[in-house]
Image (cartoon, rainbow, N blue to C red):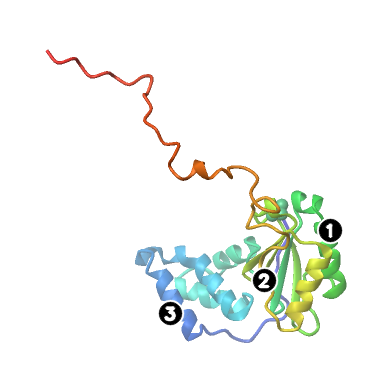
Amino acid sequence: MSVRRLSREQPASFAFSEATQADIQFWLGKFPPNRRQSAVIPILWRVQKQEGWVSEPALRATAELLGMAYIRVLEVATFYTMFNLEPVGRTLIQVCGTTPCVLRGAGEVMDVCRSKIGPKNHMSPDGLFTWQEVECLGACVNAPMAQINDYYFEDLTAASMAQIIDDFAAGRDPQPGPYVDRANSAPVGGPVTLTDPSLFDGSRARKVELPNRVQPEPAA
Ligand code: FES
């Protein structure tokens, strides 16, 4: 587990936007009034959607909103790596660096990020990009992969990651999903099993006798 600290540079203040306030009411409505602290994670997430990160003033405002001690909100924000503790670029690239992705080439994908964007965990000078190395994102079958903003980009290579970064830099909106010829996590080139249509058209359906079924009593 890494040590996570708040950014040294902090804004003077924070205010929930109108849209954020509306979402906060939605989340607070899910919990009894005396359990409003239970909404701390979705509210911090919403704050991050507003600002791109969670600043100290935002943590204090969240603590006040929920009637929590500031230290408890700070504990949540510093424990969960999904919360950015300093500003990030407009495009946040989180490359999975866990074993299955590394075995499938995540190292080369990270090399491209390093050469095109700069060192990890630092915003590029133009404010367009930040890239991070993160733990397993649960899409190992499509390794190597990266989460870019809210979407998964999968089956990456150095070349496809380079193209994706170039597309974002040019203001284009590259397609998320697998970057090889497959749908979701299906085999490359299409399905290779369960391809017989009769498996699904009902023609194989037949009544079966259960071996341990209790037989009805013969009529007297
Ligand atoms: S190891 Fe990369 S998504 Fe699981």
In this image, 41 relative to 52: left or right?
A: left
Q: Residue at x 67, y 78 (%)?
A: 173
Closer to us: 99 or 160:
160
Mark 3: C-beta under 8 Å from nearest atom of ligand 1? no
Residue 20 in the image: x percent, y percent? 49, 80
| Pointer 1 or 2: first along the chain | 1
Q: Where residue 175 is drawn, which disc sits there?
A: 2
Residue underneath mark 3: 22
The mark closer to the camera, 1 or 2, is 2
Give the residue type that dot 2 points to.
Gln
The mark closer to the camera, 3 or 1, is 1
Q: Where residue 107 is drawn, which disc sits there?
A: 1
Mark 1: C-beta under 8 Å from nearest atom of ligand 1? no
Q: Residues within 10 Å of mark 1 (few under 14, many from 20)?
A: some
Give the residue type that dot 3 points to.
Ala
Furthest residue toward left: 220
CA distance for labels 2 and 3: 30 Å
Q: Residues within 10 Å of mark 2 (few under 14, many from 20)?
A: few
In this image, 50 relative to 161: left or right?
A: left
The mark closer to the camera, 2 or 3, is 2
Residue 83 in the image: x percent, y percent? 63, 68
Give the residue type that dot 1 points to.
Gly
Q: Residue at x 70, y 81 (%)?
A: 172
C-beta proximity under 8 Å, tags 3 and 1: no
Residue 5 in the image: x percent, y percent? 70, 68
Q: Is residue 42 above or below residue 205?
A: below
- Quadrant location of the C terminus in the rendered image: top left
CA distance for labels 3 and 1: 42 Å
